[in-house]
Image: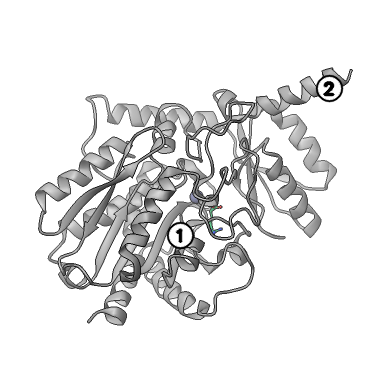
């Protein structure tokens, strides 16, 4: 009997494992809004168990939690939720249909092979890297592309340096795509690069006084995997020695600052697995090394995620605020004001622990705590859950336009505050 129970539990666990995920026919995204602290606590327990894919992690009483549930899990979850008095609404009723629609549009856009860079569809890792190279070829006086290492599966990681003021100017480091499924992030980051390069005369003042380091897609293996196998993959694709064959670590729990102290898991099959040790993931080591290399020049670190529309600053490992939090808050407010002025998109601002949840090992905390970058931000782009990670490509342009307004405010601030 005991053996049977153990075997059955293994089966249940394995059924929820990413490696054995079936196409999510019948999957839905359910939204629950906890009304008591005990319900928040309960939902965090469910998250740590790793059987459900939380699109929005539990934050606090009154804040929505979105859970993607596969068809075979629905009856159990609904029962479980009602036992703790949690009512749900169906946020996305047919995840598979949404996925199929977007996949068909994506395939149609590539009917004739790889697609030149644009912002009306999402692009593969290779397309983005080729485009970065083409910028350096076409604008050698403004752009430089460097290979800064390889991913776990051997993809080359590239960094674009943008600026015409030469070395020593104050700099902004911008990355995207740390979480593979957050496609709007690389799309928005590349939009901003394109604006700066193709309208270089308009932005001459910024480009003459500020340097930019751009890495638009810092989880290449995971990102490619979302194009080939599982659109909803979040982590890297490294080996974990998991007995279930689970792969990958959460790259935003892997940075070596208060690593694994809170909001992360040592269980490789969960979505928030922190990795076997700080910086176990080669991709994060590669990004870290660039931040270290450019050291005190870097005044701002911006990392783009989705979704929830938040402009957050450290800390993510404690609810305490950095001593200079008011400076970070002021700049975030100016940036968000500019962002909102474009389409009225609302963003919340605050420290990540206080705005969402405590989660140690994030790149923003490391940038500030170890990298000594004063202004470190995590920006969660569109939307607030109507499409979540499956944001339609029609929203790439508006996301790019509004976000770029915010980033320009940051760039002008850097120029005025640190420019010589
Ligand atoms: O949990 C995360 O890594 C980020 N949210 S996401 O939904 N894109 O996964 C937020 C990270 C905030 N920063 C830290 N916790 N340090
Ligand atoms: Zn993310």
Left or right: 315 in relation to 291: right
- Residue 59 coordinates in the image, percent (x, y): 66, 57
Q: Which residue is mark 1?
A: 379
Left or right: 142 in relation to 390: left
Secondary structure state at the residue bearing disc 2? helix
Residue at point 34%, 66% (across, down): 295
Q: How is the image coloured?
A: one colour
- Up-down relation of residue 93 to residue 370 (above or below): above
- Residue 146 coordinates in the image, percent (x, y): 23, 49
Location of residue 226 by image quarter: top left
Left or right: 211 in relation to 240: left
Q: Is residue 102 visible?
A: no
Secondary structure state at the residue bearing disc 1? strand
- Residue 201 coordinates in the image, percent (x, y): 12, 65
Disc 1: residue Cβ within 8 A of ligand 1's nearest atom = no
Q: Is residue 35 visible?
A: yes
Location of residue 170 by image quarter: bottom left
Is tag 1's residue or tag 2's residue first in the polypeptide sequence?
2
Residue at point 32%, 60% (across, down): 293
Which quadrant of the figure contains the C terminus?
bottom left
- The Cα atoms of the two marked residues, 1 and 2, are separated by 44 Å
Q: Mark 1 packing: few (<14 Cα in 10 Å), some, or many (20+)?
A: many
Residue at point 56%, 26% (across, down): 19
Q: Which residue is mark 2?
A: 5
- Up-down relation of residue 273 to residue 409 (above or below): above
């Amino acid at each position: 009997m005991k053996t049977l129970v153990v075997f059955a539990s293994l089966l249940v666990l394995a059924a929820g494992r990413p490696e054995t995920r079936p196409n999510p026919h019948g999957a839905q995204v359910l939204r629950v809004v906890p009304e008591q602290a005990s319900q928040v606590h309960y939902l965090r327990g469910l998250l740590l168990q790793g059987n459900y894919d939380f699109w929005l992690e539990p934050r606090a009483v009154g804040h929505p939690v979105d859970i993607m549930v596969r068809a075979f899990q629905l009856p159990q979850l609904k029962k479980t939720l009602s036992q703790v008095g949690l009512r749900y609404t169906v946020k996305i009723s047919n995840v598979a249909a949404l996925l199929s629609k977007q996949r068909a549009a994506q395939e149609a856009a590539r009917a004739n092979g790889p697609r030149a860079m644009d912002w009306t569809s999402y692009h593969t890792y290779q397309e983005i890297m080729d485009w970065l190279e083409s910028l350096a070829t076409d604008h050698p006086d403004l752009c430089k592309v460097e290979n800064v290492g390889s991913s776990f599966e051997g993809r080359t990681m590239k960094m674009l340096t943008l600026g015409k003021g030469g070395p020593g100017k104050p700099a902004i480091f911008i990355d995207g795509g740390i979480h593979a499924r957050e496609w709007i992030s690389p799309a928005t980051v590349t939009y901003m690069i394109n604006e700066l390069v193709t309208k270089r005369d308009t932005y001459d003042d910024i480009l003459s006084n500020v340097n930019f380091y751009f890495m638009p897609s810092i989880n290449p293996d995971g990102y490619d995997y979302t194009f080939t196998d599982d659109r909803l993959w979040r982590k890297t694709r490294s080996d974990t020695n998991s007995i279930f064959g689970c792969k990958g670590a959460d790259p935003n729990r892997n940075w070596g600052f208060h690593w694994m102290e809170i909001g992360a898991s040592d269980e490789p099959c969960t979505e928030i697995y922190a990795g076997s040790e700080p910086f176990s993931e080669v991709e994060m080591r590669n990004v870290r090394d660039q931040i270290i290399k450019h050291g005190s020049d870097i005044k701002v670190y911006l990392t783009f995620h989705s979704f929830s529309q938040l402009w957050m600053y450290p800390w993510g490992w404690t609810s305490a605020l950095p001593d200079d939090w008011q400076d970070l808050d002021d700049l975030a407010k100016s940036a968000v004001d500019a962002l909102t002025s474009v389409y009225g998109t609302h963003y919340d601002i605050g420290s990540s622990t206080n705005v969402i949840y405590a989660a140690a090992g994030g790149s923003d905390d490391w940038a500030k705590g170890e990298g000594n970058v004063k202004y470190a931000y995590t920006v969660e782009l569109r939307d607030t859950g109507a499409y979540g990670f499956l944001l339609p490509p029609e929203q790439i342009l508006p996301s790019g336009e509004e976000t770029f307004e915010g980033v320009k405010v940051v760039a002008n601030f850097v120029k005025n505050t640190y420019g010589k």
